[in-house]
Amino acid sequence: MKDPRSLLPIIEETCGSVATLTFNRSAQRNPLSSFILDSLDLVLSVVLGNQNVKTIIFTGTDDVFLSGADIRELAMLDPIAALTFAEKGQQLLQRIADASQVTVAAINGYCMGGGLDFALACDVRVASPTAVFAHPGARLGIITGWGGTQRLPRLIGKTLALELLLTGRRLNSFQAMENGLIHAIKDPVVNGAIELVEGSRP
C-alpha cells in the first residue's frame, strides 16, 4: 500500500531533536509556488513551535532541491499580485533566518533562483557532490525578490554575486564550496547534514 505521505507537497519527519522537511514535487521540479509557500508556512509553524526540535533540515527529492518560483505562475500575476507574492516569500524566508533552531539546507540537487534564496536564508548549507547552484532569472528578464540580492553578496562577496545574478552562471558543489557558498559536501547529503550539525554541539 502506498504511503499516503508520499502525496504531500512537503513531508515532515521528526526524529529526536531533528526535524526534516522534504519538498516532494520532483515531477514539477520542486517549485516554490504560492501553494508550496502556504504549505511550508503551515508545516513550519508546527515545527518551530516544537520545543524539542533543535535542528530543522530542508531537502528536496530526486535531483532537485528547489527550482525557485513557478515561472508560469509568475507570468499570470499583475503588479499587485506580484508584490504580494514577493512579500510572502520574503516573510517566510525571514522566519527561517530568524528561527531559534539551527536551520540547514541539505541541497540534494538543482538549487536555482528562489531555491538558492531559500538556501541562503538557512544557517548551514550542505550539498551533495552533484548539486548545482544558479540565479537564472536574468536570462528571463527577471531578478530574484526573496532576499538573494542582499544575502548572496554578504556571503560570497559583491563581485562574484553580481556575476551570478547578472549572467545566470552555474556553480557546481566544488565551486560553491571553494567560494564559501556552502559549508560542506556530503553524500548522502541529509545524513551528512545531521552529522555535521549534531557533531558540532557541545
Image (cartoon, rainbow, N blue to C red):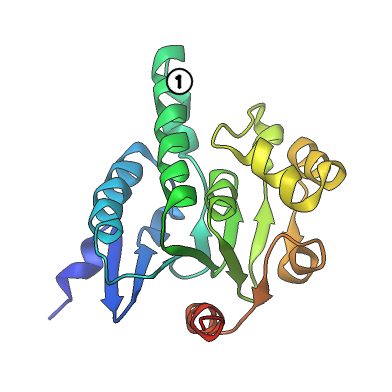
How many residues crowd mark 1 within 10 Å: few (<14), some (14–19), many (20+)? few
Quarter of the image for the N terminus: give it. bottom left
Q: Residue furthest top?
A: 79
Give the residue displayed 47% in from the left and 35% down from the top: 90
Q: Which of 116 and 15 is in front in this view?
A: 15
Q: Residue furthest left?
A: 1
Q: Using residue 24 as the reference point, say whether residue 197 is left or right of it.
A: right
Occupied quadrant, residue 154: top right
Q: Is residue 36 above or below residue 109?
A: above
Q: Using residue 179 as the reference point, say whether residue 35 is left or right of it.
A: left
Give the residue displayed 82% in from the left and 41% down from the top: 158
Q: Using residue 69 as the reference point, say whether residue 112 is left or right of it.
A: right
Residue 38 x/y as whole percent = 29, 42
Residue 161 x/y as whole percent = 78, 44
* Type of the residue with mark 1: Leu
Instruction: Give the residue number, with chain letter if any, for mark 1.
Output: 83
Q: How many marks?
A: 1
Label 1 sits on a secondary structure element that is: helix
Q: Which residue lies furthest to the front in this view?
A: 202
Occupied quadrant, residue 53: bottom left
Give the residue displayed 57% in from the left and 46% down from the top: 117
Q: In this view, does 41 lie above or below 10?
A: above
Q: Using residue 120 as the reference point, say whether residue 65 is left or right of it.
A: left
Residue 33 x/y as whole percent = 39, 41
Give the residue displayed 55% in from the left and 60% down from the top: 123
